[in-house]
Image: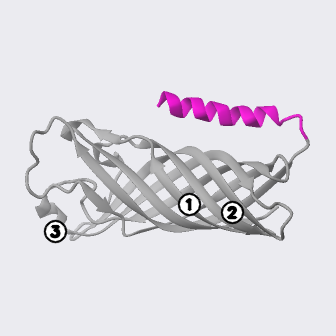
Amino acid sequence: MKTFILLLGIIAGCFYQVQAQQAEWEFGIQAESGRDWYHREYYNWETLPGGYIPNFPSYRSVGTGFFAERVLNPNLSVLGQIGYVRKKMPVDVFAEASRTFGKWISKEMHHRGAIDIGMRWYINPKSQIKLFVDGKLGANMLIAAVQRVEGFGNVVTWDAFGYNRINPVASGSVGAKWGRLAISAEYRQDLSQVRRERSSSGISGKAVVGKVAVTIF
């Protein structure tokens, strides 16, 4: 966590250093679609009972958000993003409740918010189609989980099933930009696990997503 805070401070310092420089701002919207893979570890357990699932994927995730890009020079820019993501999950695996209860759940959706900041490097800035790579640090938060329970309808869980709600994350992207349109592929990796004390367990995740961004002004 200390390393994460230090890196965020370094990136924030880049903003401060360019305040007096002539630079351009770009603002826009973006959409994404992808998939996540989660790994759960158990602590202080000598053996695990049958039926416990340490690894599980999401079915799919879709999201939208806003971005701001400050162009420092033809090759380099600072990028900030904020977004909302909805993830369709296998039912009752994240919560790890009883299997009997899980049989009554027909659908489970997780709603998350995310914010990150980083640097983008344009490989061929003079080309009409500009290729780029970027790296970012940020955090994601589980806002709520909605389970469709037979006989009860949608049941909302606000406490993240007892896990910590916020997790630091690092990401990297490769893509291309043509005019106002940018298309990229992004890899995300949690930097630590969200922990749940009552079960002595922790979950970390990684994701691969495709993104489309449009500069508005």
Magenta residues span: 1-21
Name the residue at the right extreme: 22
Q: Specify which label sits upstream in the sequence, 2 or 1.
A: 2
Distance CA(mark 3)–CA(mark 2): 39 Å
Q: Three-letter amino acid code at disc 3?
A: Lys
In the drawing, what numbered circle is on residue 126?
none
Q: Look at discs 3 and 2 and give the one toward the viewer.
A: 2
Q: Is 133 situated left or right of 88 in this image?
A: right
Disc 2 to disc 1: CB gap under 8 Å? no
- Which of the two residues, 169 or 129, is positioned nearer the viewer here? 129
Q: Specify which label sits upstream in the sequence, 3 or 1.
A: 3
Residue under label 2: 29
Q: Three-letter amino acid code at disc 1?
A: Glu
How far across and how far down the image is residue 196, in percent? 27, 40
Residue under label 1: 186
Name the residue at the front extreme: 124
Residue under label 3: 103
Q: Main secondary structure of the magenta part?
A: helix
User: Going 40% across and 40% down the picture, which residue do you hit?
Assistant: 192
How far across and how far down the image is residue 6, in percent? 58, 29
Q: Is 4 situated left or right of 181 in this image?
A: left
User: Going 73% across and 52% down the picture, which residue do you hit?
Assistant: 121
Tell me, yes or no, whether the highlighted magenta stretch contains residue 210. no
* Secondary structure of the residue carrying numbered label 2: strand
Q: Is residue 175 above or below residue 96?
A: below
Q: Look at discs 3 and 1 and give the one toward the viewer.
A: 1
Quadrant (top left/top right/bottom left/bottom right) for the C terminus: bottom right
Density class for disc 2 (Cα within 10 Å; few <14, some 14-19, many ≥20) is some
Density class for disc 3 (Cα within 10 Å; few <14, some 14-19, many ≥20) is few
Q: Specify which label sits upstream in the sequence, 3 or 2.
A: 2
